[in-house]
Image: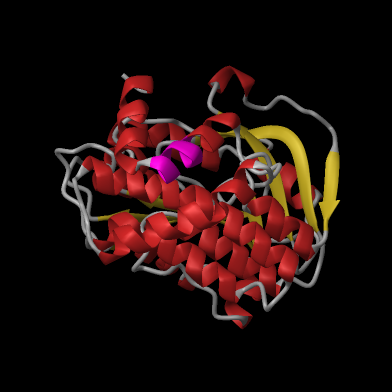
Amino acid sequence: MKKVGIVIPVYNTRKYLLDCLGSAENQLYPNTEIIIIDNGSDDGSDDVCEKFARRHKNVTFLRESAKGVCNARNKGIRNSDADYLTFIDSDDIVSADYINVLVNHMQEGGMSVCNYTSAVDSLGQCGGNTISLNNEQAFISALKNNGIQGFIWGKLFDLRVIKENRLKFDENISICEDLEFVCHYLSCCNAFVSWNNSIEYYYRQRDNSALNKRFMSYTNIDDKSFSELIALNKIYEYTHGDRDLEKAVTLRKTKSSATTLRVMASHRYKGKLYNDTLAFLRRHCVQYLVSDYGAFSSKVSVALGAVSPELEYRVYKLANR
């Protein structure tokens, strides 16, 4: 029986932590290790993790200074001796069958994916359908909002593929760092990706997440606030010149350009990066609008952003009041 490692980075999520850890420990799959990495919490999360680890033999608790979620995930990878690896965010929960579903559809050297929900009552609903994707199909699907997407959670990875190819999370990227990792992994896969539509992961949406906070004018921004574009530029490297993959990355980067310009507009940021990003958005706007990529709201965002990032930001604020 394959051993599955569950990596849980933790930072100031004490309110949700026991629910998350309990759901990881209560898996019906019998052969798991849980690696918890506290990332410099100051709300008592580390104490909760330490006490939890003492009560369970298959749990390892590691402390780290506040170096970011990528550093914590990389530490989890280094400390795992499992066959397969999955990641859970410390404010989320998983169904008791989460690992069972992922392992049952996993091919060695590939990836297994389940569906997720933001409505906890839907957790554990079984759809039954499983789709097999080759590497190219999975790569494109990860870039789409209606595909397997680039979230690191809800997926099972072959640790051998990760370690043989020296894959790790880029600690200089804070937005779309998971998408960059997923695409890099898919470029190294040598087996099919299985996508099961059973809902086994509950994703908790919080207003103070990094994705949402960056649009708030009172928060500070730095180069990492724009790192979504760095992630997409790195993903181009994993296409190895395949035109279909390059097109998919370009479409995803078009959406990301609109989002990044919104961040810039919210902080009245101008400069070369602003000009270059706006030029890219305008150059690929029509291609994005006529494609099957992106939800209607994303197309509106891209169209408005190409006209004026400041206008797009004002409309975004009105829509999210």
Report the side of 222 relative to 302 (left or right). left
Which of the two residues, 173 or 81, is positioned nearer the viewer here? 173
Q: Tell me if I can see residue 114 in this picture.
A: yes
> Which residue is found at the position 60% from the left and 69% from the top?
184
Tell me residue 131's x, y (percent). Answer: 84, 45
Compared to residue 112, the image places residue 223 above or below, namely: below
Residue 48 lies in quadrant = top left
Q: Is residue 305 magenta?
A: yes
Which stretch did the figure color magenta?
301-307
Q: Is residue 194 magenta?
A: no
Compared to residue 37, the image places residue 172 above or below, namely: below
Examine the residues drawn in magenta and state their main secondary structure.
helix
Which of the two residues, 241 or 66, is positioned nearer the viewer here? 241
Which quarter shows the N terminus? Answer: bottom right
Number of numbered discs on residues: 0
Q: Tell me if I can see residue 158 in this picture.
A: no
Compared to residue 175, the image places residue 119 above or below, namely: above
Tell me residue 253's x, y (percent). Answer: 52, 56
Tell me residue 312's x, y (percent). Answer: 37, 35
> Which residue is found at the position 51% from the left and 33% from the top?
300
